Amino acid sequence: MNAYIEKVLEEVRVKHGNEPEFVQTVEEVFSSIEPVVDAHPEYEKFDLLGRMVEPERMFTFRVVWMDDNGNWHTNRGWRCQFNGAIGPYKGGLRFQKNVYEGVIKFLGFEQTFKNSLTGLPLGGAKGGSDFDPAGKSDAEVMRFCQSFMTALYRYIGPDIDVPAGDMGVGGREIGYLYGQYRRLKGVWENGVLTGKGLSYGGSLIRPEATGYGAVYYLQEVLAHENDTIEGKRIAISGYGNVGWGIMKKAMQLGAKVTYFAGPDGYVHDPDGVATEEKLNFILEMRAKDPMHCQPYADKFGCEFVPGEKCWGVKDVDIYMPAAMQNDVRMESAEKIAASGVKYYIEVANMPTTNDALNFLRAQKHMIVAPSKAVNAGGVGVSGLEMSQNSERLVWTAEEVDAQLKKMMKTIHDMSAEAAAEYGLGYDLVAGANIAGFKKVATAMMEQGAF
Ligand code: 2IT
């Protein structure tokens, strides 16, 4: 390993010992960029990597809200503006009980390289709160979002920082957040948030974009292997917004999701989640609390395996972890490798631990694709939403979808080319890291030290 990379990694391990997810993502990205850093001794001279692992700024704020019984609650909110070298800060907000600084930083770091891969001018950011949306009424969510935005609004703007959704933040939350931003600022600046409703500047296809984009990326991988998507069976974890998009696009293209896992276990539907009725049921199920997938098995008469994940099942062609970080650990990776399934396509942000990911990459019979490329269509379409807002135009679903498809092909091809350039073969993980890194590094170098 390059001595300068080693030195920066060691500093990160010491400084962020209590933020393991952040250390993990830095180790993952930096393990790929050695040939680039070797070729650019000036990076060390200007301590480029040391700067890259330090967020440009990060806000922590108090969020106080009242529940429906008149009791007050205090949560913590964050916004991490990680890297603005290539565009305004951009990235989602995550509302989840176990969110803390380390999660926000890991997501912000990852977002920086993902956004670079989209080819659009988007810097990297992430934010969120340890607010637990489970079981909250609409009115409680509204009051929480209003309080959250009251703390955040002075730090964001269409040319400054543009938040969006992530886990726990969907169209409803974005609506309440935007309403409060507008009330506070007294301007029509709908480019300040993405993932908006269609009635106030949202983009068609944005809700589906992450899942659709993941399937478009998968198609590029299959094409590289002289294969096609027709008839393919897919096992996924997670049936939130992203999993739902994968199910829907797979159905349209003649493939099917035959396994999906939730917090309570997994469902096996050999016919696939491949009818409108089933897809609508998924939508209903994900809105329920607690999030259980067993009702699907009960309703459609299929097998439900409680308390287990579907990693290791043999009667599929593709695995797509689409739930959350560190969903697939070494134990699951070993089962996945033993199943003989060829394609492991990450979708959720950092769904695989580093040891498990490297183990899977080392399997000769497997092709592994990294989430920062595969799920980039979500933020990519957010970028298209920003363009529509600034042009005061609305693009058709067909226009957005065509752009998304093109973007996913470009991301795949750029990654494959970057890996090939450094003699790494068809290594999509290293290629995505290298391609994402290079653009940010070049922009930072050209803008001088700060
Ligand atoms: O992880 C992600 O890329 C997102 N949650 C979407 C971010 C965005 O700004 O659309």
Image (cartoon, rainbow, N blue to C red):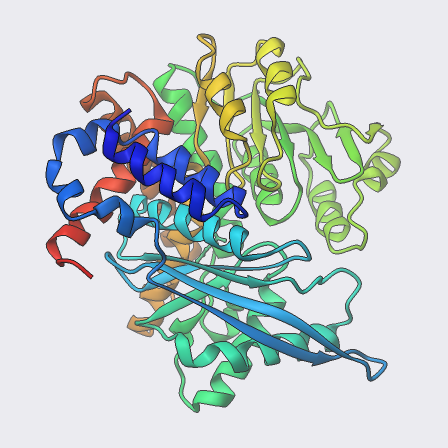
Q: Where is 387 relative to 156, above or below?
A: above
| Percent of width and height locating residue 34 | 25, 28
Task: Residue 335: name its quadrant.
Answer: top right
**Which one is nearer the viewer's eye here, 209 or 237?**
237
195 or 180, which is in the foreground? 180
Tell me what residue is drawn at x 36 percent, y 37 percent: 9
Residue 71 in view: yes
> Residue reaching furthest bottom?
186
Mark count:
0
x and y, in percent, of residue 29 in the image? 36, 36
| Residue 423 location (% of width, % of height) | 22, 17
x, y percentage for residue 280?
71, 48
Say if 261 sits above or below 108 in the image: above
Left or right, 214 with reference to 141:
left
Residue 26 is left or right of residue 62, and the answer is left
Q: Is residue 265 left or right of residue 351?
A: right
- Looking at the image, can residue 373 be seen? no
Picture quadrant of residue 26: top left
Q: Is residue 361 above or below residue 282?
A: above
User: Who's the residue at 43% across and 16% down the image?
Assistant: 227
Q: Quadrant of the N terminus?
A: top left
Horizontal side, residue 132 vs residue 436: left or right: right
Name the residue: 39% across, 80% down. 189
Q: Quadrant of the C terminus?
A: bottom left
Please name the residue shown 54% across and 74% down the image.
61
Relative height, residue 230 to residue 363 (above, below): below
